[in-house]
């Protein structure tokens, strides 16, 4: 196990297992199962979110004659803010990611192919305060029910789930996380996007079952 996982990766599981190597492996396997269950649910939400965002931008797009996926400069114009004592363009990253996605699919690539190339991180930041006036107000707020608060109801949840997704994707230990709370956020965000999506994810998720299988002897290690 030390050769396979590395001593550093194994250490957290070993500590949680009280130094028992067999229990450490069992805990590692449980971590793999809960990660897979969470990734399934997160995948449904990611696809739902990016499709909802893409559709509403396309519906209300009033920029250049080109499709919004080919209009990075129009959708993400230079917006300068003071950061660490200097002026920075807060739209640089979004522009670059969109342009790189277009390059990967080529000039004839359909909008859907460009959208599929964009990471969850791209969509995650579209609800941030940096894009409130340029993306949230003209487009994204229309995805959600009236009265939805950008920061509290959407951005905070998307940020948390993006962090969780990255931890899952990189096979990080989740044994110190409040996964019941995170699973509830997944369903809640799904329900904001689409009531049926939220209900479906909650009803078909295997997360509660896998959580119940967490070894009772495992110590919480953050």
Image (tube, helix red, strand yellow):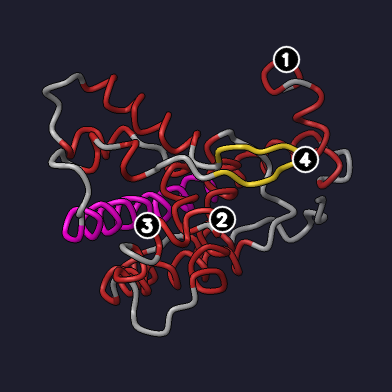
Mark closest to the chain's N terminus, 4 or 3: 3
Q: CA distance from mark 3 to mark 2?
A: 13 Å
Q: Residue at point 44% right, 38% down?
A: 94
Residue range corresponding to the magenta coloring: 33-60
Give the spatial CA distance, label 4 vs label 3: 34 Å
Badge 1 is on which residue? 3
In front of the other: 85 or 128 = 85
Mark 3 or mark 2, earlier in chain = 3
Residue at the disc numbered 4: 84
Majority SS type along the magenta span: helix
- In the rendered image, residue 71 lying in the magenta stretch gets the answer no
- Give the image location of residue 18, x and y in percent: 88, 45
What residue is rendered at 61% in x and 69% in y?
A: 181
User: Closer to the camera, 75 or 69?
Assistant: 75
Q: Nearer the viewer, mark 4 or mark 1?
A: 4
Residue 45: give its label. 3
Crowding around mark 3 (Cα neighbors within 10 Å: few <14, some 14 to 19, many 20+) is many
Q: Nearer the viewer, residue 36 or 67?
A: 67
């Amino acid at each position: 196990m030390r050769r396979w996982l590395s001593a550093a990766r194994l250490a957290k599981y070993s500590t949680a297992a009280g130094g028992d190597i067999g229990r450490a492996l069992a805990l590692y396997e449980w971590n793999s199962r809960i990660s897979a269950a969470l990734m399934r649910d997160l995948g449904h939400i990611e696809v739902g979110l990016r499709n909802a965002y893409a559709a509403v931008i396309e519906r209300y797009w009033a920029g250049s004659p080109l499709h919004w996926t080919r209009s990075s400069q129009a959708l993400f114009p230079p917006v300068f803010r003071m950061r660490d004592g200097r002026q920075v363009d807060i739209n640089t990253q979004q522009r670059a990611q969109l342009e790189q996605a277009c390059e990967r699919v080529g000039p004839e690539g359909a909008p859907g192919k460009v959208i599929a190339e964009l990471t969850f991180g791209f969509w995650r930041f579209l609800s941030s305060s940096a894009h409130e006036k340029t993306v949230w107000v003209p487009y994204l707020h229309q995805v959600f029910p009236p009265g939805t608060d950008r920061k509290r109801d959407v951005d905070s949840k998307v940020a948390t789930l993006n962090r969780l997704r990255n931890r899952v994707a990189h096979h990080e230990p989740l044994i110190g996380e409040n996964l019941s709370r995170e699973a509830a956020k997944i369903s809640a965000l799904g329900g904001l996007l689409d009531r049926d999506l939220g209900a479906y994810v909650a009803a078909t998720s295997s997360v509660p079952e896998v959580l119940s299988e967490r070894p009772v002897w495992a110590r919480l290690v953050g």
